[in-house]
Image (cartoon, rainbow, N blue to C red):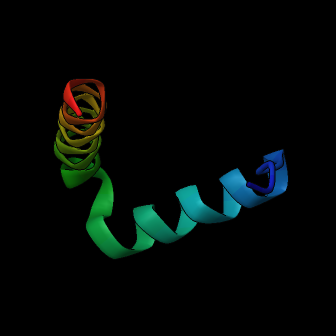
Amino acid sequence: MRNIGTTELVIIALILLFLFGGKKIPEFIKGLGKAIEEFRRASKES
């Protein structure tokens, strides 16, 4: 998998800020963290 650099992270952050606005980003990141945690838990079980 290709490494993501700083420039790509900044561009992604700006796009998220534009799409979701400042107030919804913490909710989005919290949901993303829960999804990643659930994915890791499921991959350990199989």
Residue located at (25% from left, 39% from top): 39
Q: Nearer the viewer, residue 20 or 36?
A: 36
Residue 7 relative to residue 19: left or right: right
Residue located at (29% from left, 41% from top): 29
Q: Quadrant of the N terminus?
A: bottom right
15 over 28 or under it: above or below: below
Residue 11 relative to residue 32: left or right: right
Residue 18 relative to residue 36: left or right: right
9 over 26 or under it: above or below: below
Residue 34 in picture, x, y percent from top left: 18, 33
Residue 22 in picture, x, y percent from top left: 31, 52
Q: Quadrant of the C terminus?
A: top left
Residue 3 in picture, x, y percent from top left: 80, 48
Q: Quadrant of residue 37?
A: top left
Q: Quadrant of residue 27?
A: top left
Residue 9 relative to residue 3: left or right: left
Q: Nearer the viewer, residue 5 or 27?
A: 5
Residue extending furthest front?
Answer: 46
Residue located at (28% from left, 49% from top): 25
Q: Nearer the viewer, residue 37 or 18?
A: 37
